[in-house]
Amino acid sequence: MTQSLVCPDTVSRVSSVLNRNSRQFGKKHLFDQDEETCWNSDQGPSQWVSLEFPQCVQITQLQVQFQGGFSSRHSCLEGSRGGEALSKIVDFYPEDTNALQLLHPHNGGGPTEVDF
């Protein structure tokens, strides 16, 4: 079973919120485990989610779920250590479906496995 690295001390930021309606579409819905809610961004060429963890973490799996018809065509996972500039870990291309999609970024420059 996979355990989430997101905890109460994780700082999350998002690029935008649809119509600035944080109550209905805000970032709090990213990790609320409620399939009836979600974060919705405003339209635009680049939307993002940023997570700042209280300690160093190793990402072994990334789970993303979009609403069907509203997925990203191209996504990128980036990371850094304590104030360093972000660097790309892996590009991925999610399917336009509302199914849970799993990304397994491998460390050390090895191949990246994406399960969709």
Image (cartoon, grey):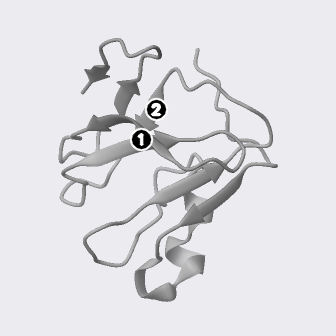
Tally of numbered discs? 2
Q: Is residue 50 left or right of residue 76?
A: right
According to the picture, the residue beneath numbered tag 1 turns out to be 77
Furthest residue to the bottom? 19
Please state if 2 lies on the left or on the right of 65 as rendered: right
What is the quadrant of the N terminus in the image? top right
Q: Which residue is mark 2?
A: 62
Graded by Cα atoms within 10 Å as few (under 14), some (14 to 19) or many (20 or more), the crowding at tag 2 reads few
SS for tag 2?
strand
Q: Which mark is residue 45?
A: none
Dot 1 falls on a residue whose secondary structure is: strand
Q: Distance between the Cα atoms at labels 1 and 2?
A: 9 Å
Residue pictured at 52% horizontal, 48% vertical: 86
- Of badges 1 and 2, the one in the foreground is 1
Whole-percent x and y of residue 29? 56, 60
**Mark 1 packing: few (<14 Cα in 10 Å), some, or many (20+)?**
some
Q: Residue at x 44, y 34 (%)?
A: 63
Instruction: Judge from the rendering whether residue 55 lies leftward or rightward of residue 70; answer left or right.
Output: right
- Residue type at mark 1 is Leu
Q: Position of residue 39 (x, y in %)?
A: 47, 64
Amino acid identity at mark 2: Leu
40 to 115, vertically: above or below: below
First in residue order: circle 1 vs circle 2: 2
Q: Are marks 1 and 2 in contact (CB under 8 Å)?
A: yes
- Residue 97, compared with residue 13, is above or below; it is above
Image quadrant in which you'd find residue 47 = bottom left
